[in-house]
Image (spheres, rainbow, N blue to C red):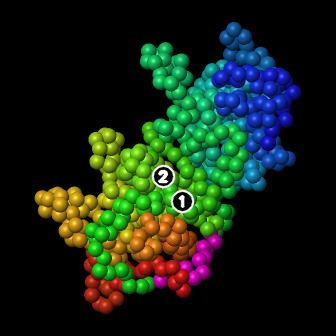
Amino acid sequence: MVDTDDRTDPEWVRCGHCAGLIYGRRFRRSLRVCPDCGWHGRLSAQQRLDQLLDPGSAEPLRQVAALHDPLGFVDSRPYHERLADARADTGLEEAVLCATGRIEGQPVVVAAMDFRFLGGSLGCGVGAQITEAAETSLRLRTPLLLVCASGGARMQEGVLSLMQMAKTAQALAELDEAGILVISLITDPTYGGVAASFATLADVIIAEPGARMGFAGPRVIEQTTGEKLPEGFQTAEFLLAHGLVDDVVARPALRDTLGRLLGLRSPAGPPEPVRAPGRVPRKAAAPTGHDSWAAVRLARHPDRPSSLDYVGRLLDDFLELHGDRLSEDCPAIVGGLGRLGGLPVVLIGHHKGGPDLAERRRRRFGMPSPAGYRKAARLMRMAAKLRLPLVTLIDTPGANPGPDAERGGQAIAIAENLRLMSRLPVPIVTVLIGEGGSGGALALGIGDRVLVSANGVYSVISPEGCAAILWKDPAAAPTAANALRLHAGELARLGVVDGVVPEPDGGAHRDHAGAATMLGEALTAALGELIPWEPARLLAERKRRFRRFGVEVAGADGGTAAGPVVDPVARTVERGAQ
C-alpha cells in the first residue's frame, strides 16, 4: 500500500545513504525506500498506519490527558513553546499515534511513534498513550504492535519522563500474564528510554534494514570511552548477529510478515482436539535386532534431513526467530512459529547444516553455544505465554566442547532448560530425528511424548567418548555403541521413548519427502492426543513420566521394568495405523 500523506513531499528526494536523486512519486510508490541502495527513509506516524493497516480499518484510540509541562522547564526557550511548535508542525498531540485496525485481516492495536515530534522522545504524554494502547490490547485480547522511533527520554519533563519507562513496562507485563502477543518494529533511530523499556520487551522484535537501536548513542559512547566503534555498530544487521532482534525485514515485506505472525497466535477459548483419522499411534512390537553402531552411522549421515528440511516440508507460514536477547544468535539452534496441519505451534530444533561442510561448520555441527540454549528457552516461554504446543527436534552430537561454551555458562544454560521444560504448561512433543547426544540433546528433550526416528539414537555419551574412557581405545566405539544400547528398539524397551517413527527404506537420507510425511503423521497424532489435556494434567503426567526412570515399577506381567511404561510393549508410530 502507498501512503497518502504526500502533500509536503518534494518533487525530487535525495537518498540519505547513497545521495542519489529519486523522483518523488517513485519514492512514495516504493514506500519511501531508495530503489537503488535500499535505504529506508523515515515515516510519520500517520504514514506508518497508512502503510501497515488494511484500508479503512483504522480507528484512533482516545487521547489520554497527561501533564505536558510539569516542571515549567526553560532552556534557550520555554518547553511549552517547543511543545506548541511540535504540535503545529506535525498535527499530532504527542509523539505517538495509536489506533486499532487490521493487518492482512488480522486484528491488531498499533502504537506508532513519530520522530518529527521532539525526536520521538518519551514523556508523560507518550507514556500515557502507550499504556492506553496496551490496556486496549488487554481489554480486546488483541495483539499489540509497537512501531518505535525515538531519541530517548524527554529531558524537559525530568524524572517524570523516567517513570514512563516503568509505567509502560508494567503495562506490557500485564499482556505477558494474559498471554497476548506483543510485536515491536524497530525503525531508525530507537534509543534511550524507549529502547530500554517497551521497545525491547516484545515477544517478537523486527527491525527495518539499517535501523539503529541502543541505550546510548554512538557519539556518546565514543566521547565517553574514547573507543572507535566498529562499522555498522547498533544497526539492525549488527543487532541480529548479536541475538538482540528476531529478524530484519524490508519495508515492502512488513505487512505480509506481520500478517502471518498475527495469524499464528493461539485461538481464544478452549483448545479444539486435533484429529488425524487413520494415523493415530498404536501399540506394536518395537524394532529388535538392530545394531547400535549401524544406527549411529545412519543417524550421522550428512544427507539425513535436518530440522529446517522438516520445517520446510511440514510447517506452513513458518517464521524463524533469532537470538537469545543477550549476546548471540546461535546457528546450531533454529526455531520459530508456524502451522502444522493448520495448528499453530512453536518449533525448536538442532540444526547441523546438511551435506555442505562449510555450512556444517557454520552451524557448529549442531552443537549449541549457551546462547543457543537461551534462544530455545526464550521460544519455550513464548509458547507458554501464547498457549501454543511445542515441538522439539533433536539432532546433536552433544554439548559444545569448546572453552567459549564453558566461559558462557553452558552447564547452567542446559540446567535452566531442563527446569523450564519440566514445568511448561503446554503440550511438548520431542522427536530424536538423528543423534541425541548427552545433555546437549536433553536440553530440548523434556517432553510429554518423546519419539525417535527408526535410525535415531540417544546416549549419555558418544560411543567414541565411552570407548576412550572405559575401553581406553577409541577404536572400540562399535563395541561401546552396542553396550550402550543406543538404537530405537532399546530406547523403546527401556521406556525412554514412547514411540518409533518409521523411515523410508534404507534410511531418511534416501527420501526426505517420505521421511517428512511419516514424521508429520507422528507429530499430528501425538499432538492430537495431548492438546485436549489441561495444563495440570500435562504437568502431572510429565512429572510421573520422568520420576519413573531408573526406578523399578510393576510391569503388566507382574515383573518389573526400568522405565515409565507400565506396558512393556513399546508403541511404534506406524503409517496408516487404524
Looking at the rendering, the stretch of residues picked out in magenta corresponds to 271-282
* Amino acid type, label 2: Val
Q: Is residue 277 magenta?
A: yes
* Amino acid carrying mark 1 in the image: Val
| Residue farthest to the right, as pictured | 7
Q: Quadrant of residue 171?
A: top right
Quarter of the image with the N terminus in it: top right
> Is residue 491 left or right of 328 when viewed as pictured?
left
Q: Secondary structure at mark 2?
A: strand
**Residue 321 screen position, x and y as percent:** 54, 48
Relative vertical location of residue 289 with respect to residue 150 in this rendering, above or below: below
- Circle 1 or circle 2, nearest the eye: 1
Q: Which mark is residue 16?
A: none
Total numbered circles? 2
Report helix, strand or loop for mark 1. helix
- Give the residue drawn at x 61%, y 31%: 211
How far across and how far down the image is residue 364, in percent? Answer: 38, 47
Give the residue at the far left of this rendering: 472
Q: Tell whether label 2 touches label 1 (CB within 8 Å).
A: yes
| Category of crowding for the residue at label 1, using alpha-carbon neighbours closer than 10 angstroms: few (below 14), some (14–19), many (at least 20) | many
In the foreground, 136 or 545:
545
The residue shown at (34%, 77%) is 489
Quick one: 223 or 364, which is closer to the camera? 364
Main SS class of the magenta portion in the image = loop
Looking at the image, can residue 182 be seen? yes
Q: What label sits on residue 334 in the rendered view?
A: 2
- Residue 311, labelled with which disc? 1
